[in-house]
Amino acid sequence: MAKKKESLYVNQKVGRLLILEIFKKEPGISVQMTLCRCDCGKEVQVQATRLRTRNQRSCGCYFHKQIPNGLNTRAHS
């Protein structure tokens, strides 16, 4: 049995993102977009699917805070 698609609504919080606007899906465009504001204050457009599946929960600021300054994340040989 298929899972029911989770609804998104304006003023809903998904991780660090607050949904400000949900754009109507335009003909010829395969994804629905949302406008969100992150806790850091940055506004970003995010695919609605990425919010529903929790694949995106911030503008990217949280990821950058997790990496210590000057640390190269690639393996050294």
Image: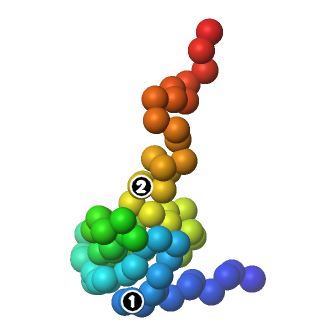
Q: Earlier in the sequence, mark 1 or mark 2?
A: 1
Residue 61 marker: 2
Alpha carbon distance from label 1 to label 2 = 20 Å
Q: Residue 33: x, y in percent?
A: 33, 72
Q: Residue furthest top?
A: 77
Please, what is the three-letter code of the amino acid marked with disc 1?
Asn
Q: Give the class, few, some or many, for how many residues have Cα within 10 Å of label 2's Cα (few <14, many ≥20).
A: few
User: Which sits in the foreground, 28 or 52?
Assistant: 52
Secondary structure found at label 1: loop
Q: Residue 6: x, y in percent?
A: 56, 85
Q: Nearer the viewer, mark 1 or mark 2?
A: 2
Q: Residue at x 61, y 21 (%)?
A: 75
Left or right of 69? Residue 35 is left
State which quarter of the image contains the C terminus.
Answer: top right
Q: Which residue is mark 1?
A: 11
Q: Quadrant of residue 25?
A: bottom left
User: Which sits in the foreground, 3 or 17?
Assistant: 17
Q: Is residue 55 at all visible to an observer of this figure?
A: yes
User: Is 35 placed above or below 69 here?
Assistant: below
Q: Residue at x 46, y 29 (%)?
A: 70
Secondary structure found at label 2: helix
Left or right of 35? Residue 52 is right
Left or right of 53? Residue 47 is left
State which quarter of the image contains the N terminus.
Answer: bottom right
User: Is 56 placed above or below 14 here?
Assistant: above
Left or right of 1? Residue 52 is left
The reply to whether discs 1 and 2 touch (Cβ–Cβ < 8 Å) is no
